[in-house]
Image (cartoon, helix red, strand yellow):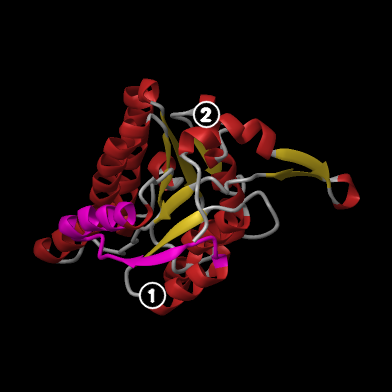
């Protein structure tokens, strides 16, 4: 297994290891070297999380590929990424599993450079449901989308403060800012909580070497999003975007690599909208 320098070493080197070159048709390509980093990405067996894990691996990072049910996919992805990457299973609806996940990653790798809180659920829950059923959907959504993010961030903060360096990227949603459909009130509320959490981390721990960022994707073509398409139709999903196609997971991943490079540390606490122009603030 290849030895990884410390995150502080990486921060000192980022100006040397991130470089720009001219690609096809004169397009400027930014080459980011994350070979000194170990990154935990939750929900990385598919969709946006898998795209993020792949992109980080292409930049040299060692990735802790978290999964809930997709063990085979996660293990295959970790093997393809290489760099000493490894798959870790945990049900993020369980607080104990969240705590154990971080402990397992830290025990295997020693130093963890960054946390990407990507895992999430979107449970359609009409108001016509019984109170108990609606509340169960609400609690499950907040447990996975917000409580797990808080618990993992708490563990990461303790680790990052000890090494005086670390970055957190939280994947929220445009729903945190513009709202969502009535069936997805819990989803919007959980993503709104992620906004406040991220900003509080950025303001509260910056002097301890921690940076925190938020991405707010719009509708992105994933398996989870297919449930929404099946319910409302693809024309509805694409009706308010300004670009010619729906956002793909690979449209999200490069921004995460950039934020973890150290090149954008003075943007800590900020939100980057990646929604194909469907919500412009």
Q: Which residues are magenta?
A: 81-107
Which residue is tagged 2?
Answer: 265
Q: Is residue 248 magenta?
A: no
Seen from the viewer's position, the closer of residues 208 and 26 is 208
185 versus 195 height, above or below: below
Dot 2 falls on a residue whose secondary structure is helix
Lower sequence index among marks 2 and 1 = 1
The image quadrant of residue 183 is: bottom left
Q: Nearer the viewer, residue 9 or 232?
A: 9
Counting from the top left corner in percent of width and height, residue 154 is at 25, 40
The residue that mark 1 highlights is 70
Q: Residue at x 31, y 24 (%)?
A: 204
Q: Position of residue 185 (x, y in %)?
A: 29, 52
Looking at this view, name the residue that lies furthest to the right.
25
Q: Nearer the viewer, residue 149 or 139?
A: 149
Q: Which mark is residue 197?
A: none
Residue lying furthest left in this view? 132
What residue is shown at x 47% (from left), y 60% (from top)? 49
For the residue carrying disc 2, how many other residues have a C-alpha within 10 Å: few (<14), some (14-19), or many (20+)? some
Residue drawn 57% across the image and 65% down it: 235
Q: In whole angstroms, how far apart are the C-alphas of marks 2 and 1?
A: 33 Å
Q: Position of residue 196 (x, y in %)?
A: 32, 33
Q: Relative to residue 91, is residue 15 depicted above or below?
A: above
């Amino acid at each position: 297994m290849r030895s990884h320098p410390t995150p502080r070493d990486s921060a000192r080197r980022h100006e040397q290891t991130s470089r720009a070159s001219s690609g096809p048709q004169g397009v400027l390509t930014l080459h980011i070297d994350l070979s000194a980093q170990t990154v935990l990405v939750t929900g990385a067996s598919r969709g946006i999380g898998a795209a993020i894990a792949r992109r980080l691996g292409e930049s040299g990072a060692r990735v802790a590929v978290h999964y809930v049910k997709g063990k085979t996919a996660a293990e295959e992805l970790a093997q393809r990424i290489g760099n000493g990457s490894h798959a870790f299973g945990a049900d993020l609806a369980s607080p104990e599993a969240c705590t154990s996940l971080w402990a397992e990653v830290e025990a295997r790798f020693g130093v963890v450079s960054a946390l990407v809180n990507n895992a999430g659920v979107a449970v359609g829950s009409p108001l016509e449901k019984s109170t108990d059923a609606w509340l169960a959907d609400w609690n499950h959504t907040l447990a996975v989308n917000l409580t797990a993010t808080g618990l993992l961030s708490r563990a990461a903060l303790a680790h990052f403060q000890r090494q005086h360096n670390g970055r957190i990227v939280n994947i929220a949603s445009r729903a945190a800012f513009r709202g969502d459909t009535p069936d997805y009130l819990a989803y919007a509320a959980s993503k709104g909580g992620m906004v406040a959490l991220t900003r509080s981390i950025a303001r509260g721990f910056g002097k301890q070497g921690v940076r925190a960022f938020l991405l707010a994707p719009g509708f992105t073509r994933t398996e989870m999003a297919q449930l929404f398409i099946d319910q409302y139709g693809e024309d509805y999903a694409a009706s308010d975007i300004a670009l010619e196609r729906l956002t793909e997971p690979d449209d999200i991943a490069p921004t995460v690599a950039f934020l973890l490079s150290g090149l954008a540390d003075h943007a800590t606490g900020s939100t980057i909208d990646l929604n194909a122009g469907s919500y412009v603030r």
